[in-house]
Amino acid sequence: MTAEFTLFKGVDIPVDIVSSAKTRTKEHTKNTFEAFLQNLEQPLIHPVLSSLSSVVGLPCSTFLCRLTAISEYTSGTRKVNTVAIIKENLTILADLDAQNPGKMINSEKHISVLRQLSELANTDGYAQDFEEWSMNNSTELHDTLISCLNSENPLIIEETAVTISFLARNLHFALFRSAETLITAMVAALAVAMTPTENHFESYRKAFELHKEVLMTKSIQLPFHYPRQNYDFHDPRFRVVGYIYYALADFLYNVPHPFLIHYFQCRISRRKEATRTHLFRILYAIVKNLSELEEFAKNISPRIEKQQDKSDGQTPPFNGTFNEITSPISQTKTIEKNNTESLENSTSEPEFYQRDQWSKLPSKLFLEILRTSQEGNQENVNLITNIMAELQSVSPIKLPSVMLTREGINPNLLESINRRLRIDIPKSVEGTLNAENDRTVSAPENGIETEYVQSHNRSSVLVPKQPKLSELKFSSG
């Protein structure tokens, strides 16, 4: 058997060697390109996106690549009025007639204007002006972006989602004012894009219920036939769904505030089954990273000077004893060290960060998730169960354990939990642990003594009933 040869630069080389070299070259090129893309995406990844499940038709890497492609703004003139450019761009975007899918020229103009807004926020010379303008005019910016989300052109919606995500990454709390309206518009745009899928889900549910009735009536086993898919693959706009899905999670991370997270959760129950699945996935990714969100919010929040009390500058009277004045030197050094560490916080405080709001957030999310726990989709039930487990692990106060089924929980039990749960600010959060031992609170409920241990890291517990003060029995443990 003679080996086959191929002519390569005047030299005869066996075909199998050439084929193996081509295969290895393709694999090396593919791996090198993947490593290049990962190096571009790595600075843009944050805990919420890394915990978020991908959607059909659009991986997260594609969304991040769109963010990395945004460059800086370049102008032909030296002096540029940033506010004038922003207002001019918003005027162009507010033209609703130009957002028709048939007008491709105007669509390209809208996309270029949206890209220019991101470029302004990405340029050092104009980013500060953009941020200062957004602090007082974020409502106007949100209204314009909402009009673009309501467009019938999928290309404009995709670019709008990328713009929202990029502006949130650069402006942060400058977009906080009226940000709830933008969240509502993004959830609504996601639901509109999911309409064909939702209709298919409903037809499946109806066909399955009809099949169950036939089985009960005829008492015979019949195979179940899935209903015919009455839409094309491109009708659900999977790319639009993916861009809004990632942009919504990215916005909630880069504008981290308990109000926005709780507001987003309240929008979930208003949507249909398949849309709720996407929203529950976003909520689960957020709940898994609540501590990272709180720390990030504290770091990026602009700081303001604390209001000085009227008694400042006056020497307060001392009511202690002489022994307290002549305390040991080690105690004095400890006090000086603590004062030095808190010196920075004594003159300023974060403007958009309050610790008590983040402490109450897990309890609020837990109560709201109980109201939306009645699900017929097993995937949604699993997501709700995981969300509740995460909230129980991160909550500063004790949350009840509830077993969920497809029928949901008893409304009476939900009302009882809502009435009994006390959402207090835990004192242990500030690091001032109580030196006393754990206390056990015994409260009679229907003739049964129910006890809950109050530990150092939980200043509030779940009381089984709201008894009178005279009915409580405290025993030192």
Image (spheres, rainbow, N blue to C red):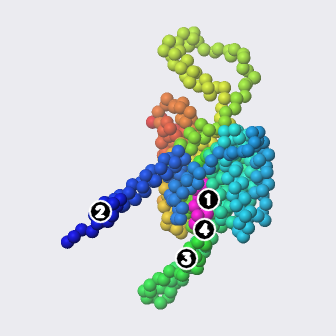
Residue 240: x and y in percent read 61, 63
Q: Which mark is residue 237?
A: 4
Q: Position of residue 324 (x, y in %)?
A: 56, 13
Part of the protein shown in magenta: 236-249
The residue that mark 3 highlights is 205
**Direction bottom: furthest residue:** 218
Q: Earlier in the sequence, mark 3 or mark 1?
A: 3
Assess disc 4: are there few (<14), some (14-19) or many (≥20) residues with their C-alpha within 10 Å of its C-alpha.
Answer: some
Identity of the amino acid at label 2? Asp
Residue extending furthest toward the left: 1
Residue of label 1:
244
Q: Secondary structure at mark 2?
A: strand
**Magenta span dominant secondary structure:** helix
Estimate the x, y position of residue 112 in percent, counting from the top left: 69, 55
Q: Which residue is mark 2?
A: 12
Q: Looking at the picture, which amino acid does disc 4 mark?
A: Arg
The kind of residue on which mark 3 rests is Arg
Give SS at disc 4.
loop
Does the magenta segment cover residue 246? yes
Q: Label 2 near label 3: C-beta < 8 Å?
A: no
326 sits to left or right of 28: right
Q: Residue at x 43, y 52 (%)?
A: 32
- Pick whichever, 407 or 474, lies toward us: 407
Q: Quick one: label 2, few (<14), some, or many (20+) residues within 10 Å?
A: few
Q: Residue at x 78, y 56 (%)?
A: 92
